[in-house]
Image (cartoon, rainbow, N blue to C red):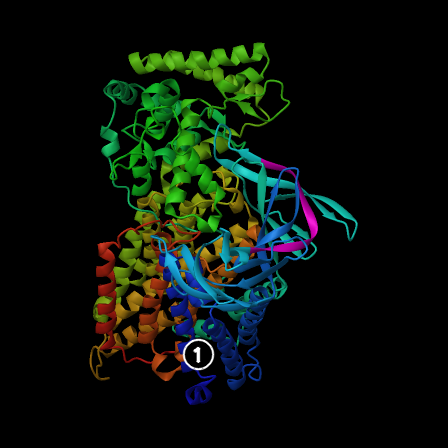
Amino acid sequence: MKFLRDNIGSFWLTYLLLAIYAASCARATFIENDFGTEAAVALVYASFWFKALHIFLAINLIVVLIRFRVLERKRYSVFLLHFSFLVILVGAALTQNVGFEGRLHIREGESSSVMESRENYLIVQTLEGDVLGEHSIKKEEFPVRLASVGSQPFEFSIPLSKGNLSLRYKDFIPNEDLKSGQALVSLSYDNNQDDIALQQGVPSRFLLGDLKMAIMWGPKQIQLPFTIKLEDFELERYPGSHAPSSYSSRVIVEDTVNNVTMPYHIYMNHTLDYGGYRFFQESYDRDELGTYLSVNNDPGKIPTYIGYFLLTLAFIWILFDKKGRFCKLSTFVKSQNTMGMILVCILSLGVSAYATEEQNSTQAETQMLNDVVQKLVDLQNNTKEHSKIAGTLLVQDFGGRIEPLDTLASDLVHKITKKDGFLGLSNMQIYLSMVAYPEYWKGVKMIRITTPALRKILGLSPNDPYASFYDLYTSNGVYKLYNLVTDTNMKKPAERGTLDKDILAVNERFEAMFQILSSNSLRIFPDPNGTTQKWYAPIELEQLSEQDANYALGLVVQYFRSFDSLVVNGDEKAALDALKSLKAHQEHFGKDLIPSAMKVEAELLLNHSLIFVKLYYAYLLFGILLFVVSLARLLLKPSVCKQRWFSKKLDLILLTLISLILLLHTGALILRWYVSGHAPWSNAYESMIYVAWASALSGILLLRHSSLAFSASSMMAGIVLFVAHLSEMDPQISNLVPVLKSYWLNIHVSIITASYGFLALCFMLGIITLFLFLFRKEVPKDSPDYERHLRLDSSIQSLSAINEMSMIIGLAMLSIGTFLGGIWANESWGRYWGWDPKETWSLISMIVYAIILHIRFVKAGNTPYVFASFSVLGFYSILMTYFGVNYYLSGMHSYAAGDPVPVPVFLYYFVAATILLIVVAGWKGKLKSGV
C-alpha cells in the first residue's frame, strides 16, 4: 500500500497498470479459446479484481490530470481526451451493474411477456407436503458463474419448515471440449445429504428425504411490463438458394397499462425501442415459425455514447491544437527542412479485413472425368476470343444490378474456385460451358473447401481442397450440408467458429455453382411489358406470356446451339449472330435500365486490367529504389552526394513517380466505386487495397519531403497489396449478410482499417530508424566524417518525429474506429462491448500504443532509439489483432475452430531478426530526441 500511496499519479504506475490490464485481457482471450466464454468471464472480465483494476485506473488517471496540472496549463484537448475515458467507464459501469439483457422467444400467432436472462442462475423450486392445502412451494434464484476453470464457489441457504436447505458448490466436471460440463452441487436438509450433477439448461427433479425439489442451472425468466405478439416471421432467401438474405419479425406491442397497441417491423439494424427496452432481431426457429429477439435495458448507453463523442472530438482537436504535441512535432520537422506539413483529415473509407491461408493445390485440376477432358480442350482452343465478346452481354445479378456478363462470370467462378480462371480456362469460358454442359461440370472438383474438418464430414481426403457438385450429395440424393447450414444459421454470430463459417461459405459456393448450372443466374431477358425492373433467366420465362416466353426461349436456345457448334467445329459466325440478337432484345426492352456503354467499358477495364496487381509491383519497385538512394546519400561521402547524377533531382523523379502511382491507385478505387455503385469497402479484398492506399496517402500528407519516410510508405503500400493478392480474399462485389448492412459498420471499419495503414508505417519507420543506428558512430568535430554524422543524426531525429506523428494519427483512428464498432454492435444486436477477442485485442493495441506515446515522459524513454524499438514491437499487437485473432482464437470475428493453423515458420525468423536489430542498434542508440 505504501508503494501505491507514494506512486499514485506517476507515469511508472500508469505504465504498470496499463500493462497489467492489457496482459489480463490478452490472457482472457486465450482462456476463452481453451475453456469457453464462461471461464473467461468468471476468471477475468467479471472478477472482483478486474473491476477493482478499472476503478484504480480511473483514480490514477484523475490524479495524473491533477498532478500535472493539465487544466491549469490550458491543455484542454488533452484533458478532454482523458476525461472521455472516465465518461466511458461510468457508462460501462452502469451497463454492467444496473442494466440487463436477455432473449425473448415467440412463435407465430402467439404472445410473450417473459424473457430469459443472459446470465446464469441456480434456480431452486421446493415442494413440502403432498396433500392439497398443506403443501408449500418456494422458488429461489441465485446468480452463479460456473465453468471448467474459474468457477466461483457458492453456498446458499433456503429456510424451510424443518430447517435450512443448504446448497454448496462442490466441483465442475468438464466435457471433452473443456468448454461445457456438469456442475456438482452438494445438498443438505433435515439431516439428509446428497450430491447432484447439473447440466446447464436442463432441469433436474430430486428427492432429499421427504423434500421434493426441481433444480436448474441456467437463465432465469424476467417478466416484461408489456406483451409482444409475433404476427409473422419473414425469411427471405437468395433466389434458388438455401442461404438467408434477410429475416425479420412483424410484431405487435400490447401494453394494457398504458393502453398501447403498436405494430412494428423488427429486422437487422432496425430495432424496437419501447418502455426502456430494446428488441433486436437475433435468430429464428428451425421450422421458420418462431423468432428469437435479443432484449436489453441499458441505462449506460447515453453516457457511453457521450464518452465516444468526446473522445472523437478530443482526438480531432489534438491534431489542430497549436499547444499540442502533434503541432510541436510538425514545427520541428519543418525546422529540419524535411517536410511542408499538411494536417490530415480523418479518413472514412474501408472495411474490416480478414487474413486467409495460402492457395496450395492444383490437385483438383487433374481429377477430371475422362469424358470432360476433350471438351475442355475444345473450349480452350475455340472459345477464347468469343468469350470476350460474350462478356459484354448484360445480365441482372440477384441484387438487381445490371452488369456485364463478364463481371457475373468472374464473381461466381472466383467465389466457387477462389481463383481467377480454372483449368486453363477464363472465367467467361467456364461460365458459358457450365450453362451449356451442366452435367459435365457436376463431376469436376472445383468447389473450394477450406477446413480439413469439413472435408472429413463430406467424405473427402483431408488434403483435397476442392469438392465436386456430386460430392455434396449422398448416394440417396440428400444435400449433405442442409442440416449443418440450418444449425449454423441458428447460432448467434458470436458462437460461430471456423467450421461454421466454412460450412456457410461452402454452401454459398454450392449455391453459386447451382445458379450457373441451372441457368438461374443467366438473367438476360428484361420484362417485355415494362411493368417490373426484374430481368428473367431462361428457367423463369414461364412467368411471361406464352408469346414472349417462346420468343425469348428461342433466342437463348439458338445461342447455345451455335455455341456448341463453336466448341466442336470452331464456327463462330452463328454464335456472333445469335449474340447480336440477344443484345438487340435487351436494348429494345431494357433501354431504361441498361448502363451506358462507357460504364460497361469501364467495368470490363477494371475486370481485365489487373490494376491492383500491377500497382504493388510499382509501389515496391520505386519504394525500394528511393530507399536505396536516400540511404546511400546519408552514408556516402559528401563529395559523392554532390555529384550531378546523385542530385536531389533523382529523389524528385522517384517521389513524382510514386505520387503518380498513388494517383492511379486513387483512380482505380474511384473506378471500382463507379462500376460497383457503392463505396469500395464491402469485402476483405477491398479493405486491403484501401489499407495500401491509406499507407501511400500517409506518405503524401506527412512524409513527402522526407525521402526515407516516403519510401517506407511506398514499400508498405506495395507489401499490403502483395498480401491481398497472395490470399484468397474475394475481389468481387457480393451480397452482404443482414448484420453487415449498416452504415455504422462502414464508418467503423473504414476508420479502424485505415489506422492499420498508419501504424504499419510506424513499424516501417521504426525499422529504418534502427537500421540507421547501425551506421552511427561518434566522431570529433574536426573529422571529415563529421558532416555525414550530423546528417545521419538529423535524419534519425526527423524520422522519429514523423513516426510519432503517424502514431498519433494511427492511435486516434484505431480508438475512434474501435468505439464506433461498439455503436454498430449496439445498434445491430444490443451489445456495444462483449469482450469478443477481436474487440479485446483492438483495446489491447490501443493500450500498447498509448504506452508507447507516453513513454517519453520518463527520462530514459525520451530517445529516438527507444521510440523506434517500441514502434516496431508494438506492431505485433496489430498483427495479433489483424491476423492472430482470425486463426488462433474463437469469436465472432474469428476463423478458428478446433486445432489452430500452425504458426508460419518464417514468423519465428522474422521476430528473431527484429529483436536482433533492436539489440544491435541499442549499442549505438545514445541520441537525444530532437523535440
Residue tagged by mark 1?
A: 14
- Above or below, 67 against 901 in this view is below
Q: Is residue 710 magenta?
A: no
Query: Could you say which quadrant of the image residue 917 lies in?
Result: bottom left
Relative to 220, 893 lies left or right? left
Residue 439 visible in the displayed image: yes
Relative to 227, 358 lies left or right? left
Task: Give the residues drawn in magenta, as a range.
Answer: 220-234
The residue nearer to you, when weighing 877 against 328, is: 877
Q: Secondary structure at mark 1?
A: helix
Residue at 65% x, 55% y is 223
Q: Is residue 227 magenta?
A: yes
Residue 820 visible in the displayed image: no
The residue nearer to you, when weighing 469 against 677, is: 469
**Badge 1 amino acid:** Thr
- Above or below, 749 against 418 in this view is below
The residue nearer to you, when weighing 284 against 866, is: 284
Residue 557 horizontal/vertical position (percent): 44, 12
Residue 749 horizontal/vertical position (percent): 48, 53
Q: Main secondary structure of the magenta part?
A: strand
Please identify the residue farthest to the front as the structure is shown.
Answer: 131
Residue 535 horizontal/vertical position (percent): 54, 24
Point out the image quarter for the C terminus.
bottom left
Task: For label 1, count other residues whose C-alpha is less than 10 Å away and answer few (under 14), some (14-19) or many (20+).
Answer: some
Point out the image quarter for the N terminus.
bottom left
